[in-house]
Amino acid sequence: LKSSSRQMRRGGRAHPSSSSSSSSSSSMCDEYGHMTSEGHTYIHPTPFVLQNGAVLPRAQLRYRIYTDTVLNERRDNVLVICHALTGNASLDSWWGGLLGPGRAFDTSRYLVVCANVLGSCYGSTCALSENPDTP
């Protein structure tokens, strides 16, 4: 988060940060609007063991950061948004009315982070991901 805590404000509305580490930016349009797989990618440093015992050798999780501020020295101004209905980190697409300065997800006070879930077709490890152990 440290490298992404720069100011990202345009026209008074929070805009998501994106990373060059993002692979191709696939896009879908559904009832939530235009959503993409843009964002940063966290790669788990060791094999990730699922609850059922299966192992993901290189689990990846796509996330996006929305902010008009910077991460403070105490690192206590982060707001993590979790969701159950979409596998997408496009917070601005599905809860955009709550995002921005002075709103519930106040980007003038908090560095707002939203991550996809494993299995998401928007950039996280899913059924279509390549298995690095398969020749």
Image (tube, rainbow, N blue to C red):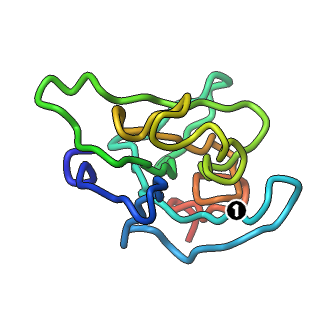
Residue most toward the bottom? 24
Side of 111 where 86 appears, left or right: right
Side of 9 where 122 appears, left or right: right
Q: Is residue 30 above or below residue 66?
A: below
Side of 45 where 28 appears, left or right: right
Side of 120 where 24 appears, left or right: left
Q: Is residue 39 above or below residue 56?
A: below
Q: Secondary structure at mark 1?
A: strand
In the picture of the structure, the residue carrying the numbered disc 1 is 35
Q: How many marks?
A: 1
Please tell me which residue is depicted at 43% across the width and 28% down the height of the picture: 79
Please tell me which residue is depicted at 42% across the width and 49% down the height of the picture: 65
Please tell me which residue is depicted at 63% across the width and 22% down the height of the picture: 51
Position of the N terminus by quadrant: top left
- Front-lying residue, 23 or 125: 23
Q: Residue 73 appears at what percent x and percent y? A: 11, 30
Specify the amino acid type for callout 1.
Met
Q: Residue 124 appears at what percent x and percent y? A: 58, 53
Q: Residue 134 appears at what percent x and percent y? A: 58, 64
Please tell me which residue is depicted at 60% across the width and 45% down the height of the picture: 116
Q: Within the image, what quadrant is residue 54 found in?
A: top right
- Front-lying residue, 32 or 9: 9
Q: Residue 17 appears at what percent x and percent y? A: 41, 60
- Packing grade of label 1 (10 A; few <14, some 14-19, many >=20) is many
